[in-house]
Image (cartoon, rainbow, N blue to C red):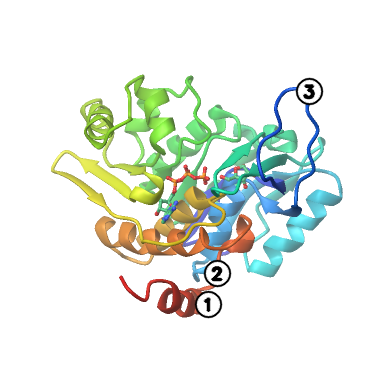
Amino acid sequence: MTKPDVLVIGSNMVDLITYVDRMPVEGETIAAPSFEMGCGGKGANQAVAAARLGSNVSFITMLGSDDFGKMQLQNYKDVGIDTSTIGIGEANSGVAPIFVDPSSDNRIIIVKGANNELTPAVLEKYEDCIKEAKIIVLQQEIPLETDYRAIELANQYGVPVLLNPAPANKDLDIDYARRVDYFAPNETELSSLTKMPVDTMDKIEAAAQKMVDLGVKNMVVTLGSKGVLWVNKQHSEVIPAMHVKAVDTTGAGDSFIGSFAHYIAAGDSVDDAIRHANEYAGVTVTRKGTQKSYPSADKFKILKEKIFINQ
Ligand code: ATP
Ligand code: RIB
């Protein structure tokens, strides 16, 4: 087991992405122009983004006992992720049928499969890895109890934690949100947690402020093409996204989270890490697919010069 810059504890899925001209109505069958299969899942996406940027990444996840599981394991090896903390479950792999419309928006259904087998007991086998990480990244496609146990262990060893509360889960215990260093929902997740409206920037800020008032240390709220709102006790700032022509925003949030973790582990201030992660996520939305759209550090440099030419 190597010492990770970034330790991701979370999900893996196989993404089944259909690009549609429009969504079918109930009872209707329509033909779609194209389909792509790729490796996805929020945890895996975040791990891959950090690894492609050059972080030393470990990933604690449970793969399915099927060909999809084998495909994903090979993918992580190819990307250079430490696979010694990856287990094989009894269930099939998690899968995610995804529909992307011409405006680049997506609808996703997840079937968690073996991800449900990433229990606190499985996690505890990797306490040594948790202790050594520079930052731990969590999401909510595995049992919540496992996220809670990860936060307890990270707190015990003084390791910073980034929790991306996605997909939204109303059962999340706010006490655990207080115990992480960076709490990073998107607008919808923020609204679901606070039960507050988020249809204007003022309302988004009020909802994020409510979480800070409840004791959350740093709110990092992703706002799609509007960028990111960063709020803590001393500070409230919107850091704008890059101006790009988006073709597929699937996994944009994960590319932001994974790259943000990479930049924090590399020593960036929160402010700089958000700016750099906005750039990385901005590049990924100009490309199709989830992990497929995440460039390596070298490719990112080249793409940045091309895509952000007038900014
Ligand atoms: P998903 O669930 O599809 O992964 P999300 O809702 O979690 O996405 P968003 O808030 O949509 O995440 O986007 C995350 C980040 O990606 C934004 O903060 C921004 O940096 C970048 N981004 C997303 N959409 C765009 C866009 N149209 N133009 C530029 N940057 C974008
Ligand atoms: O955030 C995007 C991801 O959500 C997809 O890769 C899909 O697998 C779902 O987990």
Disc 2 and disc 1 in contact, CB within 8 angstroms: yes
Q: Which of 11/300 is in front?
A: 300
Rounded to the nearest angstrom, the CA distance separating label 1 from label 3 is: 44 Å
Residue at the (48%, 31%) spot, across then down? 148
Disc 2 target residue:
295
Residue at the (48%, 19%) spot, across then down? 171
Three-letter code, disc 2: Pro
Q: Earlier in the sequence, mark 2 or mark 3?
A: 3
Three-letter code, disc 3: Gly
Where the C terminus falls, by quadrant?
Answer: bottom left
Does mark 3's beta carbon lie closer than 8 Å to ligand 2? no
Does mark 1's beta carbon lie closer than 8 Å to ligand 1? no
Is 144 displayed left or right of 15 in the figure? left
Is 17 displayed left or right of 161 in the figure? right
Three-letter code, disc 1: Lys
Is 175 displayed left or right of 98 in the figure? left
> Residue 202 has which mark?
none
Disc 1 target residue:
299
